[in-house]
Structure formats: C-alpha cells, structure tokens
Image (cartoon, grey):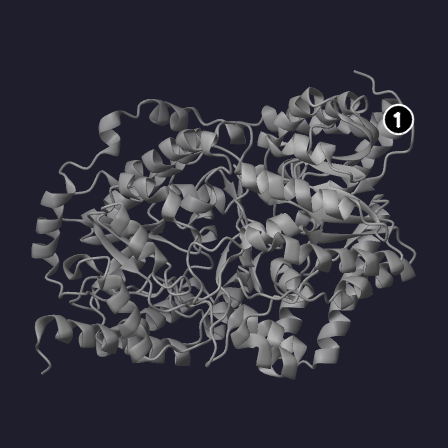
C-alpha cells in the first residue's frame, strides 16, 4: 500500500514522557528533599530542567506538539486531586502549612497521618494514589501548576498541549473517604466537579493553550449506562463552555466500546484513540459510528507500553484507513511513554542485532514522527526508514533466539495432570501442620529485607571487578546470618533469608533464564521514586541451572526454624517484563512456568518445606474488559499450578499479591490452589479479608498488617486492631500475620521496630484467643 499525502500536515505528538531523566535525576532530587539535603527551590529547578530537556528531546525527534502537565513529583492522579482541591481532611493542615510537604504527606504519610491508598493504574505496573471523596467533598480549582508548566513550554517556543486526567475517570478511580458509607459513588459528585474543570480550562486558555487533552481511560472498561450518561453529560457541559480551549478527549489501553458513540457525539473538537493491541478494535468501531466528521483524530498507532519496534507498514495501512474517518488525522503513541524506558541507545551490553528490535521512549517518538511524515507527504518521503524497518522486523522473526525446539517440545507435552497437586488441600494442610508445628496466627514476612547501601555497593564492586566472587559471597552470607538472627530474636515463626543477593524480584530470575535480556539503563517508574528495570523477554525460556537453591539451603543450615524458598511466579515474570509480542502470552507463561517448576522441585529436594511463589501481577494483568477475563485467567492460573504442582503434599506452597483490587479475582485466587496467600490489606483497611470470606475461601491467608510503602511505624496496638479485623473474616486457624509486601525499600531501624510490633501484636491477639496471658 502506498499512502497518499494527507490533506493537512499530520502532527506528531505523544501524551506523556518519562519523568525521571537520563540518570534518574528526579528520584535523587525528591529523595534528597525528603532527607533534607535538597532545598525546595533546588527540587523545583531540577524539575524545570527535566521538563525543558524532555521537550527538547521530543522536538528534536520531530514531535510537533508536546504535552505539558504529564510531569509529576510523585503521581499525576495525586496532582489532579490537588488541582481540584480534593485534599483529605487529615492532610489539610500539612498542605496549608507547606504545599510541597503536604503533597508528599498525602503520598507517603507521616508518623501521625496515613497516606492515600495506592493501587495499580489500570493493567499497568504504574501505581496511582486513590482519591478519597465523600458527600461533603468541596472541590476548589487550583490550576497554578498546570498553567506554569504550559507557560514554561510556550516560553521555550514549543507548540504545547496540556494533558489532564478527565473528570469522569477521576471520579471513577476515586473511593469513599474513611468514615463514608462503602456504597457511596464518587461519580455522583460530577455536577460539583465540572465547574472546577471549567475554571481550569479557562485558566489554560488564558495562558495560551490552543488544545487541552482530557484523559478518560476509565471509559475503555466495562461501564454502566449511568457511567456513560455521566460521560455524555460531562462533555456536553464542557463542550458548551464559551471560554475554553479546544478539547481532545483521549482513551488508551483498550477499545472504547459503548463509550465511543458517546464521545463521538460530544461537542468536543477531537478524540484520541488507541489502535494497538485490544485497542485495534477501535478501527472498526469508529467506522461503524460514521467516523468523526469535522473533528481531529489523534491515532495511537505506536505501542506506548512495550519496547518492540513498530511495524511501519501496518501502521500506515491503519492511518490510511483513518484518513477517511476524520477531518484531520494526527499520529501518536498509544498512551503515555511513561511506561517505557527513556533511550535504547544507552544500552551498551545488548547484542547490536537485538538492539535493532527495541524502541524505548526516544525511539518511539522518532517512529511517531516518521509515520506522521509519511502520512503527510506519502511513503516516498520515508522510503529509507520503511526499508530499514522491514529489515529489522525480518531479523527478529528469523532469529534463533526466538525459537528453541527443546523448549517448544516440552511445552507441547504438558498434560492436565501436570497442573494438579497430588492431594486436595484438606489433606495437604494436615500434613503441613504436622510437619511445621507452627503456632496459631503464625508470623512471617513476604521475602525481602532492606537492601542497604553496603549491599548495593558490594554488587557494584563485583561488577566493576573491585572485589572477586568469593568476597562478594562472604558479604551475602554475613547479611543472611544477620537477617536470620534478627528474625529469631524477634520471634518470627517462618523465616526468610532476606534476598540480599537479588537486585530485583524479576530481574534476578531473568538474568538466570534463557530468552531474557537485562538492561542497564531501562528504568521505568513504578510509583513515586521507586523505579524498576523490567527485563526484556525476547525468546524461548528455560532454566540452565538452579537459581535460588544454594542461598536458601545456606539459610536453612543456619537455623532450626522453617525458611521459605522465594520465587517470582510466571505471570509476574511476564507482567513485570517487556514481554514478547510475537506469540500468545499464555504460550510464554507456560515456558516460564516449566522453568520455575524445575526450581521448585529442586528446592523441595534440598529440604525446603515452605516455598513461596509470588504473583503480585495476577490482578494487574487482568484485561480491562470482562469478556477478555476467562481466556487470561485460564492461562494465568494454569501457569501458576504448573509451577507448583510437582511437590509433595506436606510441602506448603505460599503465594503473595499486593496493591491491586482483589475482589473480582477471588475465584482465580482460589483456582491457584496455593496453601497460603498473603495480600496487601493495611491501606485498604482489611477489605480483602472480607472479600475472601464472602467467597468462602477455605485456605490460609495473611492479609497484611503493616503498610511497607509508607515510612510510618505502626504501633503494636494498631497492628493488633488490624488483626482483630482480619479475625472477623478469617478463622484464627487459617490467619497468618505478615506485612503487606517485601521490605526491600525500607530502612533497618523502622524494619526492626515494625516487625517487633507485629510479633508483639500477634502474641497479644493469640493470648486473647487462648486466654493465656502468661
């Protein structure tokens, strides 16, 4: 197909860009501010420099309309709460005293005040701060930050488009504030919120905005008629405003479905749609509603969530079709590039052949600009780029890395029996209790202990050759002994070795499995100042040799108490990697599961009687539309069972999940057939315990009693109170006591105090149950 030139030059744009900087300057500045070593003015100047650099990179790549408002010190949904004045009552004094300190208090909490709840941003690994709203919430506009960032971009000579979370999505993401009835629906506050958005739009127009983008990704989920009516009303009212910029309503991550005709009919000037992955269905749906006559369409044809190069010819075909469906078609990535690393050219350790297959944020902006040029001027204008793209795609498709006959033969030989334990749970649990001899309300942790500067320095010294492997391993042994000694003295019942040898719960395993590639600079924001380097799953997966057995066995040799073996599960190994897109994800998950099954079997053979396979990503990877759930959950739960079902009945299998909404996957949790599950529960006030109870979940569970993502140290009384709430839903004989998540990001002083309080609370509640207060 040869694309004809578009009637008007297509704009190239994106919805957002990585915030951290090439060397994670934002992380360092924010954490320095928290420590008191960076002033507020210095932090603001770092932020301004990073925005300036980002816009320059975008313009140099050929992006002709840059986003503003996508930058954040912590989280863009929290920024929206500030913009609309939705500050919880408990944080108002802090915000009034100092806006920046108050902002971070909402994000992280203080010793005296709990933070906002944190959960996953749709089906990504980004976390947002959940707005807390109630019938008495009063919204007040504060557009100062949004206006200042727009003025900064315009002052640098850029054509800029502010990007805001839309009012409908903001309310649909919110939860009832503490003390508000659980059945309160924040969307009922829409009429109260719209005048605030009207004021913000007017302020941005006065500051020079031609367009403002309002993101409504919540509309790609299954929505009720009431939700759709709310969206129609919102954009009918905003569209009718006289004093506003042009409005572009954006969606991403999936197809709009029933919301598409609602937005297409709204009196706004443009829509931005995702045409990648499940969003590809938007093409036919858009044609079915008659297109967008007289409106601007921003077409997200470059995948903003994965790191594989774009198929330019396929995208041009889509764009060519779209030219007949809108007044103007512009080119974009499918979503904010927040979800991918910054620049693939910084990777010096990846085979140059494989590097040709990768596109990080900077490369994606070049792809977007190339497609916009081809759309505007015809394919002849980008003939060289198209030829290079075809060659790179062919290189990947024909590579031996992507096809291992032995792995594929083993995967093809899987039977139903491979995914079932040899005995049902009721018989297994009796054997496990007899073997382990644990008390009522057994205490444990999730796995990791603080990753100290000394540990990070030791890893860096090993990489740089300043110490040898023997010196490094002695340092790891010292740390394991210290972690075990502390746990024994504290009175924890099931110990962990603390994972000092692990850089990351996914990367550590990826570096030891075939088919994976590790990056050196591929940082992606997970939440706040927490950045991860997702590995690249490029080919077929196998385990050449044991990965954890040595260190788990060493830990077991140092104590008489049970020590958990710790693995990351197959779904999370996919979800927290950049997964290959050239085969169904279920096929990839089965390959990873079989590799992990070998590790589980070897741990058991070495004498490990408690093995935890973490699956925190099971819920976050759930497709956004209910119709797509069964297929996903079938392969997701099957892959977990493939990993864990080869063990003896008396080997206790644990799993762990955190920071997601679990209520709609309780049946899937049940289908995992794990013996014990630990779940995040502290910030959500034990909500998950009630969800398990309503499902009649019959296995053991540990709803978390310490929010490890906050620097707060909960008292013994607080932990005991949460335990009592847990006991109201889960019988004592099936209730475990543990933190919400691993302790890698915490410091040793708070870890010691928190775990001591956790054990003391467990003993206090045990005494209440038994009447033994001795």
| 491 left or right of 186 in image | left
Q: 355 and 172: which one is in front? A: 172
Question: Is the residue 253 above or below the residue 6 in the image?
Answer: below
**663 lies above or below 153:** above
**Crowding near the residue tagged with mark 1, few <14, some 14–19, many ≥20 C-alpha atoms within 10 Å:** many
Judge from the rendering whether residue 253 lies leftward or rightward of residue 600; answer left or right: right
Q: Nearer the viewer, residue 460 or 359?
A: 359
Which of the 4 quarters of the picture holds residue 288? top right
Residue at the spot 76% in from the left edge and 29% down from the top edge: 388
Who is closer to the viewer here, 731 or 482? 731
The structure residue drawn at horizontal position 39% and vertical position 29%, both measured from the top left corner, is 407
Q: Is residue 183 left or right of residue 268?
A: left
Q: Position of residue 568 (x, y in %)?
A: 38, 49
Between residue 743 and residue 647, name the one nearer to us.
743
x and y percentages locating residue 195 in the rendered image: 72, 57
- Quarter occupied by the N terminus: top right
User: Percent position (x, y) of residue 227?
Assistant: 57, 42
Furthest-top residue in view? Answer: 1
Left or right position of 746 against 328: left
Quarter of the image for residue 406 reads top left
* Count of number-bearing discs: 1
Looking at the image, is 368 positioned above or below residue 712? above
Q: Position of residue 226 (x, y in %)?
A: 55, 41
Residue beneath disc 1: 6
Secondary structure, mark 1, is loop
* Quadrant for the C terminus in the image: bottom left
């Amino acid at each position: 197909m040869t694309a004809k030139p578009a009637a008007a030059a297509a704009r190239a744009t994106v919805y957002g860009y990585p915030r951290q900087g090439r060397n994670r300057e934002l992380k360092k500045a924010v954490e320095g501010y928290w420590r008191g070593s960076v002033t507020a003015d210095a932090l603001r100047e770092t932020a301004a420099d990073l925005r300036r650099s980002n816009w320059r990179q975008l313009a140099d790549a050929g992006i002709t309309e840059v986003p503003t408002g996508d930058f954040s010190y912590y989280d863009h949904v929290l920024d929206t709460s500030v913009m609309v004045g939705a500050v919880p009552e408990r944080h108002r004094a802090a915000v009034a005293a100092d806006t920046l300190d108050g902002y971070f208090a909402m994000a992280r909490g203080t010793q005296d005040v709990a933070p906002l709840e944190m959960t996953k941003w749709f089906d990504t690994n980004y976390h947002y701060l959940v707005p807390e709203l109630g019938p008495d919430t009063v919204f007040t506009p504060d557009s100062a930050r949004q206006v200042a960032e727009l003025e900064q971009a315009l002052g640098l000579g850029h054509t800029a488009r502010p990007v805001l979370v839309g009012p409908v999505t903001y309310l649909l993401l919110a939860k009832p504030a503490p003390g508000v009835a659980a059945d309160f629906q924040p969307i009922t506050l829409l009429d109260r919120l719209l005048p605030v958005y009207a004021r913000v739009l007017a302020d941005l127009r006065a500051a020079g905005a031609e367009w403002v983008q309002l993101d409504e990704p919540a509309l790609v989920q299954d929505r009720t008629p009431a939700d759709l009516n709310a969206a129609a009303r919102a954009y009918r009212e905003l569209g009718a405003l006289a004093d506003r910029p042009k409005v572009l309503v954006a969606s991403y991550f999936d197809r709009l479905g029933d919301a598409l005709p609602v937005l297409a009919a709204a009196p706004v000037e443009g829509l931005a749609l995702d045409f990648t992955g499940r969003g590809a269905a938007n093409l036919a749906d858009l044609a079915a509603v008659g297109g967008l006559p007289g409106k601007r369409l921003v077409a997200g044809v470059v995948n903003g969530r994965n790191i594989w190069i774009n198929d330019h010819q396929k995208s041009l075909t889509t764009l060519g079709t779209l030219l007949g469906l809108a007044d103007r078609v512009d080119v974009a990535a499918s979503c904010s590039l927040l979800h991918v690393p910054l620049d693939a050219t910084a990777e010096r350790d990846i085979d140059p052949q494989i590097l040709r297959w990768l596109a990080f944020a900077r490369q994606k902006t070049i792809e977007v600009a190339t497609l916009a040029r081809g759309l505007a001027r015809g394919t002849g204008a980008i003939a060289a780029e198209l030829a290079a793209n075809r060659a790179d795609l062919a290189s990947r498709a024909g590579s031996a890395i992507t096809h291992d006959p032995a792995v594929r033969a083993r995967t093809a030989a899987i039977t139903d029996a491979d995914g079932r334990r040899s005995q049902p749970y009721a018989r297994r649990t009796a054997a496990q209790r007899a073997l382990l001899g644990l008390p009522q309300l057994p205490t444990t942790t999730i796995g990791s202990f603080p990753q100290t500067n000394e540990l990070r320095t030791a890893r860096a010294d090993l990489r740089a050759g300043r110490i040898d492997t023997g010196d490094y391993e002695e340092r790891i042994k010292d740390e394991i002994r210290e972690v075990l000694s502390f746990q024994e003295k504290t009175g924890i019942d099931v110990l962990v070795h603390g994972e000092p040898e692990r850089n990351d719960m996914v990367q550590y395993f990826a570096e030891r499995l075939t088919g994976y590639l590790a990056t050196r600079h591929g940082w992606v924001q997970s939440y706040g100042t927490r950045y991860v380097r997702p590995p690249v799953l490029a080919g077929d997966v196998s385990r050449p040799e044991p990965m954890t057995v040595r260190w788990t066995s060493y830990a077991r040799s140092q104590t008489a108490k049970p020590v958990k073996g710790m693995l990351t599960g197959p779904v999370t190994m996919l979800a927290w990697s950049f997964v290959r897109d050239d085969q169904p994800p279920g096929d990839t998950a089965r390959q990873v599961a079989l590799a992990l099954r070998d590790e589980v079997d070897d741990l058991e053979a070495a004498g490990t009687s408690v093995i935890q396979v973490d699956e925190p990503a099971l819920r976050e990877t759930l497709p956004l539309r209910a119709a797509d759930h069964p297929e996903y959950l079938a392969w997701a739960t099957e892959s977990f069972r493939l990993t864990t079902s080869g063990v003896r009945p008396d080997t206790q299998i644990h799993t762990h999940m955190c920071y997601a909404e679990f209520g709609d996957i309780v049946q899937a949790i049940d289908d995992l057939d794990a013996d014990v599950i630990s779940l995040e529960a502290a910030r959500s006030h034990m909500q998950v315990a009630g969800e398990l109870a309503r499902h009649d979940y019959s296995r053991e569970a540990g709803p978390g009693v310490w929010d490890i993502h906050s620097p707060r140290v909960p008292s013994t009384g607080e932990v005991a109170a949460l335990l009592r709430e847990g006991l109201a839903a889960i019988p004592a004989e099936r209730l475990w006591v543990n933190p919400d998540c691993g302790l890698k990001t915490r410091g040793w002083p708070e870890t010691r105090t928190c775990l001591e309080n956790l054990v003391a609370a467990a003993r206090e509640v045990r005494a209440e149950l038994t009447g033994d207060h001795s």
